[in-house]
Amino acid sequence: MFDSLLVANRGEIAGRVIRTATEMGIRTIAVYSEADAGLPFVAAADEAVLIGPANPAQSYRNGPAVIQAALATGAQAVHPGYGFLSEDPAFARQVVDAGLIWVGPSPEAITAMADKVAARNLVAGVGVPVAPGTEEPVRTPEDAALAAKEIGYPVMIKAAAGGGGMGMAVVTAAEALTAEYEKVTAFAGRLFGDPSVFIERFFPRVRHVEVQILGLPDGTVLAVDERECSVQRRHQKVAEETPSPGVDEALLARMLAAARRAGEVVHYQGAGTVEFLVSPAIEDADGRKLKPSEFFFLEMNTRLQVEHPITEAVLGIDLVRAQLLIAAGEHPGFDEDSLTHTGHAIELRINAEDSKRFLPGPGLITQWHEPTGEGIRVDAGYAAGTTVTPSYDSLMAKLIVHGADRAQALARAERAVADFTIVGPKSNLAFHAELLANPEFRSGDYDTGIVGRMRA
């Protein structure tokens, strides 16, 4: 095991990685921007290096500066967290070429899953179900119109280099296709540097369910847990839970097997997530299934997910510890057969945004009080006296609750939200209180349209 680790990220995920590394006796190095000098993760590290101004391109996305900081401080390994450089194969290769250990999958695996069209084709070749869609990027509005007509409306236009819910649009009729095509290609070109798009069938009522995988040093790929991620605003997740209330044992077994195959085809190492769309079963008036639920590959995230703590809660494991062990060539200490699922867990993302339109609301935090109690965990990136700036994602903290069953987890979540106090910037705590009281959410019978219906 290496004895020093640079964390190439910020906020709550940097603090999360630093906490586990410290528990393992690993010396930690943080990098931070001028805007983040006062955040808790900087003080938590054994050493901290100012890496640049607030602009991410000059700090957290500045690969050469990150590597220089690692070499200057004697770090032996680099953990990228999520976002920023975590899924950049060129950066992963630069880390390895600098003689450092990359805590993540190989650059080749990242590359294979970075292009969503290529990834679709790759996993389809090993029997992973994919939604009806184009097998190549569409280059013109005319090609897009022909593809959409063949697939059948409604369709989704998606950036080939996109991810994280960005760079996509739903089109319900041919008249709107050209305008939406031009919007998505322009957005993709600006944000991802690649305007390529592809088209898939859009399912109006669908669940978003992901599977946590771990690729071991011996080549084995574990599929350890599923997470329900259907509570989204603007295609961005805002709450997750496990186990999924919409996936039965038979469907889960098929999804786990498909996720393993997706990991195996790219020789995956470390923690990753395979995301699926799940269409509901079709039943008759008496509740008899006429058609079972189907699932389709969405994408693979070649990094640790924001929502990983709920898997940790129900399995009693530490996924960051597993990442670090695997990066060092060691076994994480568990396999699928040795894991026991206990209870139910829910994660609520506490963002600096209003609870109605979800617009960012940065500012100085004058009061910050976290809930405590049995089954409650808070992974926070901020504290009283710190400032949420508009330079970064609005996530301030993650509230994770664990209960013996879903009913207890919901009750604990309600109490925890009521006890969480943030004064200064706007927060979406009121939205979470509304969500937890929503009959559709409480029933477990919901889909990715739930937030839209709450705001209709």
Image: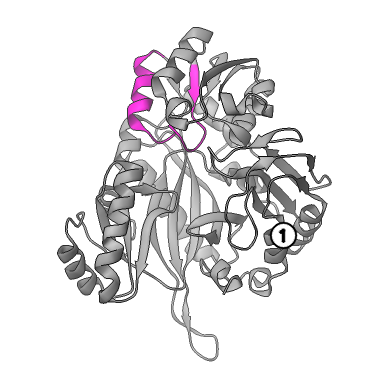
Determine whether 160 is above or below 207 in the image.
Answer: above
Residue at (33% x, 43% y) in the render: 192
Q: Position of residue 278 (x, y in %)?
A: 45, 65
Q: Is residue 91 magenta?
A: yes
Could you tell whether 427 is left or right of 251 in the image? right
Taking depth in this image into account, of 196 and 129 the one nearest to the observer is 196
Q: Position of residue 77 (x, y in %)?
A: 49, 18
Asked if one can make out residue 219 in the rendered structure from this viewpoint, the answer is yes
- Indicate whether 257 appears above or below 151: above
Q: Amino acid at mark 1?
A: Ala
Placement of the N terminus among the 4 image quadrants: top right
> Which of 3 and 134 lies nearest the eye of the viewer?
134
Q: Residue at x 42, y 53 (%)?
A: 257
Residue 370: percent from the left, percent from the top? 79, 43
**SS at circle 1:** helix
Give above or below for 130 relative to 47. below
Instruction: Count neighbours of disc 1 (C-alpha within 10 A) and say few if under 14, some if 14 to 19, many if 20 or more.
Output: few
How did the renderer colour the structure? one colour
Query: In the shown orientation, is residue 413 left or right of residue 199?
Result: right
Q: Tell me if 50 is positioned left or right of 105 in this view.
A: right
Tell me: residue 408, above or below residue 352: below
Based on the displayed image, in which of its 4 quarters is residue 86 positioned? top left
| The C terminus: image quadrant | bottom right
Q: Which residues are magenta?
A: 77-99
Is 247 one of the magenta-colored residues?
Answer: no
353 to the left or right of 72? right
| Tag 1 residue | 430
Identify the residue shown where x is 72% and y is 42%. 378
